[in-house]
Amino acid sequence: MKKVLSILMVMTIFFASSFTPKSANVHEVEADIVDLAVSTEFLSTLVAAVKAGDLVNVLKGDGPFTVFAPTNEAFAKLPAGTVENLLKPENKAQLVAVLTYHVVPGKVMSKDLKNGQKAKTVQGSEITVTLKDGKAMINNATVTAADIEASNGVVHVIDTVILPKM
């Protein structure tokens, strides 16, 4: 019986230490939001857009930022020629408006989201959060991967490019 209790005690300690909150961990997240995006192939269109909009240094800044990051497939859903048009130097202001609409000041984790919540973006307009059937939506985009922590914020991957009213 003592042996069983000892094994249970060791297992309890092991499992408890496995689920220690991140704030208690000794290592910190080193990659910033841009570094994370650059190292993620399915965000390469977003990376190209951030570079074209001269937003790399901003998103490498202290933050914290919450970024709703559209995938390459999300950009591909836009009407033909939209991405190419936005990447032209003469359309930089419009590109920056679209990109900054995907960024909220502060670090907002998925557990912090509330149904019907509104959040003001860096662009200046609001986005709306909808929680339904265990999924989070930002406007008309579904969050497909949440809480990807960076040294200067958090990234939530979305399946659709969200567009501000212009």
Image: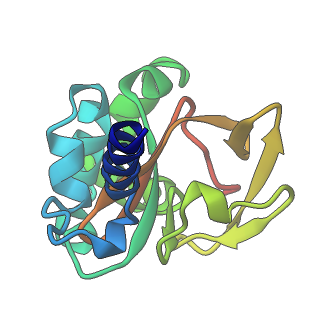
Closer-to-camera residue (64/46): 64
Question: As displayed, is residue 27 above or below residue 11?
Answer: below
Question: As displayed, is residue 22 above or below residue 84?
Answer: below
Q: Residue at x 39, y 37 (%)?
A: 4
* Residue 4 shown left or right of residue 57 in the figure: right
Closer-to-camera residue (55/7): 7
Q: Position of residue 64 (x, y in %)?
A: 37, 77
* Residue 154 shown left or right of residue 74 in the figure: left
Q: Residue at x 33, y 79 (%)?
A: 63
Q: Which quarter of the picture shows residue 2?
A: top left
Q: How many marks?
A: 0
Q: Of all residues shown, which one is farthest toward the front?
A: 1
Q: Of all residues shown, which one is farthest toward the bottom?
A: 62
Question: As displayed, is residue 144 above or below residue 126?
Answer: above
Closer-to-camera residue (53/6): 6
Closer-to-camera residue (143/28): 28
Q: Position of residue 102 (x, y in %)?
A: 51, 56
